[in-house]
Structures are given as C-alpha cells and as structure tokens.
Amino acid sequence: MVIFANNINTIQKRVFFILFALSLILSHYGTSYLFFISLLFVYIFILIFDKLCNSRRAMLTAAQDRINIGGVKRLFLNPYLLCLYLLISVVWYIYISGSSTFDTICGMASFAFNNLSTEMFGFETSRGLYLATKSLGSPLHSILRILYVITQLFIFTGILYFIIYEKGKKDITLVAFSISFAIILIFGLISQNFSAMDPRRLYHFCLYILAPFSVIGGLALLNLISNKAKLNPISTGVFSPLRIIYMFFIIFFLFNTGFIYEIAKDHPNSISLSQKTIQEHGDEDDKAYLYMSLIEPHNVYSGSWITNNMKSQDDKVYRGDWVEGYPSLTVYGNLKDDGLRTLFNMEGHNIKHFDQSTVEIDRGYVQITYANLVWGVGWNWDNPLKQRTTFRFEEINLSLHNMSKIYDNAGSEILWNR
C-alpha cells in the first residue's frame, strides 16, 4: 500500500519496493512470479495510457479530471526495477535453491505455453470452475459458495465504479494494479495452466489489492438499489447500505473461518476449530481433508524410521494416501529427490501411490499412515482439478497380510514387500 501513498516520495517508494520484492522472492516463488507479471502489466498499461493522453489533448484533459496520471517519469516503477526484480529471482532460484525450484518453474511455464492454444480455456479441466460447480452436499456449504460469488460481483463492480464514478483523482498505479489483479483472478478461474496455485490461494493473493473494491462495489450496488426503489430513508436507518455491508462481511467471516460448520456439526473443515469434531462426526472425506492438512506425529516417526533404515536408496516407499510433499518422508525423513516432485503429484522417484485398484507393487516399503490405520481411510488426488477421491482402506486389493511388518508405533506401521 506504500506505493499508493501520496506523502511518500518516489525514491522512498523504490526503496520500500526493493525490500518488499526481496522478502517476496525469498518466501514464495509462485507468488513472486505472479507479482512480477502484475508489475509488467502495470508498467506497460501506464506507458500506453501516458502515450495516448499526451497525443490527444482532449483525452488528456478528460483523464486528468478522473485519474492522477503523473507521467511515466514520476512513476516509482521503471525498467531497471523490473530487471532487478527478475535478476534477483533467477539468481535466488538457480544458485541458492540448487536450480531445482527454477527448473520446476520453467517446466510449469513451458507446459502452460505449450497447452495455451488447446487448453487455455478448457472449462472441463478448470480448477476454479470445478470448485464453483461441484456438488457440496450441504446447504450451509452452498451458502458460502454464494457468498463468494457475491463478493466477486462486488469486486468487479467496485473497480468499475472507482474508475468511472468515484469523485476526485485516482492514482493511475492503483487503477493499473486493480485491473491486473482482476485479470489474474479471471484467468485463474477459467484455466488450470495459468497458475500452479490452488484457486482459493490465488483468490486470497488477489485480495491484497482487490479487497477494498468489494466494499466499494457493495455500497454502490446497495445505493443503486435503494435509489431505484426510492428507499432513500433507509440510508440513515438501521438498514443503511453501510450497515448491511458490515453485517454481510461478518456473516461471510463466520462461514469462511468454519465457525458456522463447527456449530452446526455440518462437515466442519477448520483445522484450528474442528479437529475433534471431524474425528467424531466427520465422514471419510472430512477425515481425508483433515489428515491432508496435518503433519501427524506417528507418520513422522515411521517416515524417519524408513529413511534411517533403508537398505538401498533405490527402494520404493508406497503410500495409500497423498499429502502435499509427503513431509513425514521428505522433510522429517530427509528422503532425497522427491520434495518438489511430490508437491503436485501423488508419485515421485521413490514415493509411490497405491489405492483400491492396485493389485501388486514392486519391492519396497509400505507406510500405513495414521489415517489408514486408525480411521480406515485412503484417498487419491487429482492435482489439476484439486479433487480428492476417498476410499475405505479395507477395500484395497493388495495382500498386506503377506508382507512383513517391520515397524509399529500404534499409529503407523511399516511393511516390507520382498
């Protein structure tokens, strides 16, 4: 928000930008590259807008009435800052991260580019549309989806209202950033190849800029409705537009945090509020969601035991569930070569997956996790759609009783398949 402040000079903004860029690049590569795309769009947008306004006096006069242009020369962003941002990103991901992260990013970018013409608008493989249209099995969860749709309607209405109708001059940088993040939000909804992020994380990322427009758009729509219906007296009453928006976001907050589901015991999904409720009242899918999100201590101990006692580094480890990156094996167990590979896929070089359709597996270890052993649930994972498919662990076709149990901590077991 510092870059939009009027009481900070350009040099100070550039210093703050460099500090922010360094922090962002060091913390998360996906967010840093999306932010770079947004910065590039903002600079090109302002450059074109500035050229058009300077070439047409009438347009310049009209634009200055609504937007504080300031010219590209006064803009805190310039090609040198963009190149510096990109250079720091490349150096960090190649030399500091051993180039594995950079290779992963290049692979994802290449995949997205190669499939741009055929799958960019492939609605049947869109994560966002899948999440927006899938059956939720609960009226309360359907209400939250409606609330999300309303907030996004507010956001796009707010951007248009801010640009067209809001009194006073608007900062062209803020306008450009708002448009760029709105475009990211749209492409994240309709295309799985645009970002490796979950659509919900992408939505939260965009809200850093777009959240205020949700309030602006909500107030604009409510004022429009009250004016059209000639309900002006409510503008100063209990049900004023501002108070309605206030109550709307309180309800949205209670649904979004999982508080409502916890109270109603209706498929609760909050890791902070509902672990006990999920274990006592949740179905198989609820339990799978819980243990996809937790690092279970029993799994950590068994995963560490495997890697400390492996006979060969080429031995496989088989799992009947999927957890992002398999931290019990890769982080705590220090199993090499599979950390990045298994962030998005069920299988890596050493870690393999099995389910109820698997008939046989090769020589290696089978890690029976806490969810498998205690709750009797396993699951598959479709990363492009972010879709989890659960199954009862007792339904698997593998002959586990023919394997040798070599480790047991009462919450996780290790079997050896010869």
Image (tube, grey):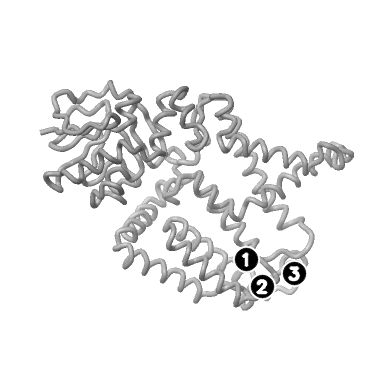
Tell me the quarter of the image containing the C terminus: top left
- Measured as percent of width and height from the top left, residue 116 is found at 41, 52
Q: How many neighbours does mark 2 have within 10 angstroms: few (below 14), some (14-19), or many (20 or more)?
A: few
Q: How many neighbours does mark 3 have within 10 angstroms: few (below 14), some (14-19), or many (20 or more)?
A: some
- Measured as percent of width and height from the top left, residue 363 is found at 13, 36
Classify residue 370 by image quadrant: top left
The single residue placed furthest to the right in the displayed view is 233
Q: Which residue is mark 2?
A: 8
Left or right position of 28 against 306: right
- State which tag comes first along the sequence, 2 or 3: 2
Q: Which residue is mark 3?
A: 64
Classify residue 169 by image quadrant: bottom right
Residue pictured at 30% horizontal, 63% vertical = 99
Disc 2 and disc 3 in contact, CB within 8 angstroms: no
- State which tag comes first along the sequence, 2 or 1: 1
- Amino acid at dot 3: Gln
Q: Which residue is mark 1?
A: 2
Q: Please name which of the two marks, 2 or 3, marks the residue nearer to the observer.
A: 2
Foreground: 402 or 163? 402
For the residues marked 3 and 1, what is the alpha-carbon distance in whole angstroms? 22 Å
Disc 2 and disc 1 in contact, CB within 8 angstroms: yes
Left or right position of 355 against 39: left
- Measured as percent of width and height from the top left, residue 297 is found at 34, 38
- Amino acid at dot 1: Val
Position above or below: 270 against 120 = above
- Measured as percent of width and height from the top left, residue 130 is found at 47, 36
Tag 1's secondary structure?
helix
Tag 2's secondary structure?
loop
Classify residue 329 by image quadrant: top left
Q: How many neighbours does mark 1 have within 10 angstroms: few (below 14), some (14-19), or many (20 or more)?
A: few
- Amino acid at dot 2: Ile
Left or right position of 334 against 314: right
